[in-house]
Every structure is written in C-alpha cells, then in structure tokens.
C-alpha cells in the first residue's frame, strides 16, 4: 500500500470485516487467518501456522525482518469476534454513515489488525523496513480468554523486546498503558427434577437456586474499588413442564489488582446453596492477570505521543483499561507492552460497533513510525 488514503485503508479494513469469525467457529476464524496470511506473504513475511485444537482456529505468525537484528517487536491482534455468523446480514451490516464505518468486529479489533498490516505493507511498498524485526501474531481465541493461545503468546513475548497491541483505542484516542485483571468463574447448580404439573413439590429447582446466587454474586460489585462481577451467561432447564435439574452460569469479574482477585475468589468459593438439597459447584476459570505501567511502558507511551505530534495529532492521554486483552499476559511477564494502538470508535460487542474513518490515516502513520523508530533501548525491562 503505497499511498495511505482513507479509502484504501477502509477498503482493507472491510476485507477483514467481511469474513465473520465468531471464536467458536474454527473454520470461520481460519478464513480470516487465510486472508491475513495472504497479506503477510505479499510483503515477504515468513509464515508459521499453529493448528488450533478443541474447536479453536489456528494461530498465525508472520515474521517481518528489520534493518537491525536482535529481539524485536511482537505485534498482537485477535481474529475472533463475539458476533455470531449472520450478524453482517442481519443487525450489523457494513456501512458508512458520516465518519462512522460500522461492522461486526470492525472496532474490536479487525480495524486495528488491518491498519497494522497496512503500516507494514506501506513500509514494504515504499522500499523501507521496520528497524527491529516485527513478529505479527494473530490470535484465534482472545474473546474467550485465549485458553489455547496463552502459552504461545507468553513464549513469543519472552523472545521479544517490546509488545504492541492493536486493540481499540479507548475514549476516542487514548493509549492503554495498563489493564485490570479479569477472572472467570463457572457455576453449576444441580437440583432434583420432577414433573412440574403432577409432582411439583417433589422437585428442587436448579434455576431458582442459581437465581439467588446471581443476586448474591452481583451484590459483591464494588464500584468504589472498580471490582465488578457480571453474570454474563446463564443456561438451565430442558423443558417448561419440568422442575429443572441443572443450571450453569459464568461470572466475569474485573479485578484491578491480584489482591482483589484473591478476595473475589475466596468469596465465590465460600458460596453455599440456600436449599441443602440443591448442589452448588463453583469452579475458577481463566484468569488474566493485571498489568501495570512500568518506567519502560512510560517511555514507550511518551515516545508514541511525540511521534503522533510529529505526524500532526495528539494521542488523548493514558488509559487504564477495564477489559482484558492478550496484553495482560505479556505485560504481567514484564515485557514492555503498549496497548490500545488500534482504531478509534465505539460500541464493541454491540450492534452499534463502529470505527471513525478519520482515524485510519493518522493511526496507520503512527504504527509506521513506531515500526521505524523503536529500537532495543525500549526493550529494557523495568
Ligand atoms: Zn479485542
């Protein structure tokens, strides 16, 4: 991509968005991987594909040489979205309205992936190269907490000087310098089934027990300390004429610091069922540890803000993000990680998801300049 124009950049973004890729559909995610692989091959990157397991798509890795050798930049993005197949033809068609371009995953985070690829393609097309080698790593399962990809992400991060994450920018232009921790818990209640007409009194409802637990769990939310608990998924019962045998739920907890996670864990594991005849099980699920701003991350941020000024815009400040990303893993390892370098917009995980077309050129140029200017000195851990 020789010329960085809004039209060219948006059409590149749309090529990603046109391929729907819910995490749970490995074939769909692999179609995005095939698209991304083609783009990486076009710029002469070395390709590795790690086959997915257990219904998860592949991890795609592209290695782009730099002018210098040594540990390089790990660029992280995820290919999966939370939107089921059919969203594009249904509630969230691709369209442009004013400065807004809509589409499933356009903001979180196909827009970010695409501008990073366009930045590398621009360097290639203009006969330039990144200073440090760049490893592009496209993740298939971020939206469910990267259970498959985490070990590979951590292994790659340890071999790199710096991690850049092209997750969406928050608050219309901020850059993410820290992220809270995210913990998931799985709940299951098991009751006693009965015919709901003839033998109602003999049954013990798994759903009723879960409903009481949900209220207790959500009441643990403490906005003062930014500790929130959300029961985001619940499933139970098989038929309306049965007292339900079982019910399951998933709790998603925002835990800014490790001590918050310990506190939430203790409270959830201490939950008891109200009805002694209904069994309650609480199982800890995936945990993304928090990452906090280090002096090395501050240097990366300051450098990025200065590059933006040279290009002619201001990044809108630092952001501590609530939601997790794969940057949590790399930041928690102590590898200098700058996140939120993707596109501006709003409505992630909703049917109003959009990016701002006007951010595409400046944000792509910012990535071009980061690739050109980051050197080994930014990789010093602190
Ligand atoms: Zn994301």
Image: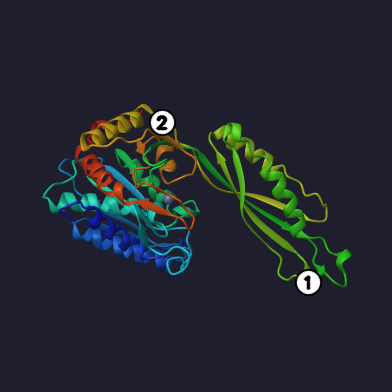
| Label 1–label 2 contact, CB within 8 A | no
Say above or below: 115 vs 254: below
Q: Is residue 109 left or right of residue 232?
A: left
- Within 8 Å of ligand 1, the CB of disc 1? no
Image quadrant in which you'd find residue 303: top left
Instruction: Locate the C terminus and report the quarter of the image it occupies.
Output: top left
How many neighbours does mark 1 have within 10 angstroms: few (below 14), some (14-19), or many (20 or more)? few
**Residue 215 image point, x, y percent:** 71, 47
Q: Secondary structure at mark 2?
A: loop
**Residue 366 image point, x, y percent:** 25, 41
Q: Is residue 249 left or right of residue 292?
A: right
- Residue 369 visible in the picture: yes
**Mark 1 to mark 2: distance in Å?**
54 Å
200 or 377: nearer the eye? 200
4 or 262: nearer the eye? 4
Question: Of label 1 and label 2, which has the lower sequence position?
Answer: 1
The residue carrying mark 2 is 293
Residue at coordinates 49% horizontally, 51% vertically from top-left?
145
- Residue 333 visible in the picture: no
Residue 241 — which label? 1
How many neighbours does mark 2 have within 10 angstroms: few (below 14), some (14-19), or many (20 or more)? many
Badge nearest the viewer, 1 or 2: 1
- Within 8 Å of ligand 1, the CB of disc 2? no
Instruction: Locate the N terminus and report the quarter of the image it occupies.
Output: bottom left
Residue at coordinates 70% horizontally, 60% vertically from top-left?
247
């Amino acid at each position: 991509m020789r010329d960085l124009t809004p039209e060219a950049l948006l059409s590149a973004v749309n090529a990603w968005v046109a391929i729907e890729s819910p995490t749970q559909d490995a074939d769909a995610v692999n179609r995005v991987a095939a698209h991304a692989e083609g783009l990486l091959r076009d710029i002469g990157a070395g390709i590795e594909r790690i086959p997915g397991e257990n219904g998860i798509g592949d991890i795609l890795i592209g290695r782009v040489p730099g002018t210098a050798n040594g540990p390089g930049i790990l660029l992280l993005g995820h290919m999966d979205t939370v939107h089921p197949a059919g969203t594009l033809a249904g509630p969230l068609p691709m369209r442009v309205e004013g400065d807004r371009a809509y589409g499933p995953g356009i903001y979180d985070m196909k827009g970010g992936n695409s501008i990073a690829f366009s930045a590398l393609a621009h360097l290639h097309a203009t006969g330039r190269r990144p200073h440090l080698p760049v490893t592009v790593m496209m993740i298939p399962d971020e939206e469910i907490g990267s259970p498959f990809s985490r070990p590979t992400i951590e292994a790659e991060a340890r071999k790199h000087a710096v991690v850049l994450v092209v997750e969406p920018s928050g608050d219309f232009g901020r850059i993410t310098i820290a992220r809270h921790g995210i913990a998931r818990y799985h709940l299951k209640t098991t009751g006693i089934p009965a015919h709901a007409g003839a033998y109602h009194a003999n049954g013990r409802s798994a759903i009723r027990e879960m409903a009481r637990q949900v209220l207790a769990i959500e009441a643990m939310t403490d906005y003062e300390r930014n500790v929130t608990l959300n029961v985001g998924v619940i499933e139970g019962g098989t038929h309306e004429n049965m007292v339900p045998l079982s019910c399951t739920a998933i709790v998603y907890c925002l835990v800014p610091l490790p001590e918050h996670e310990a506190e939430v864990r203790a409270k959830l594991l201490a939950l008891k069922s109200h009805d002694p005849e209904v069994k309650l099980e609480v199982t800890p699920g995936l945990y993304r540890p928090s990452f906090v701003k280090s002096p090395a991350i501050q240097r990366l941020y300051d450098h990025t803000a200065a590059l933006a000024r040279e290009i002619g815009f201001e990044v809108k400040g630092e952001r501590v993000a609530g939601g997790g990303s794969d940057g949590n893993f790399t930041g928690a390892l102590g590898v200098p990680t700058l996140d939120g370098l993707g596109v501006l917009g709003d409505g992630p995980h909703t049917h109003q998801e959009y990016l701002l077309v006007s951010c595409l050129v400046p944000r792509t140029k910012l990535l071009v300049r980061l690739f050109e200017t980051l050197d080994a000195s930014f990789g010093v851990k602190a």
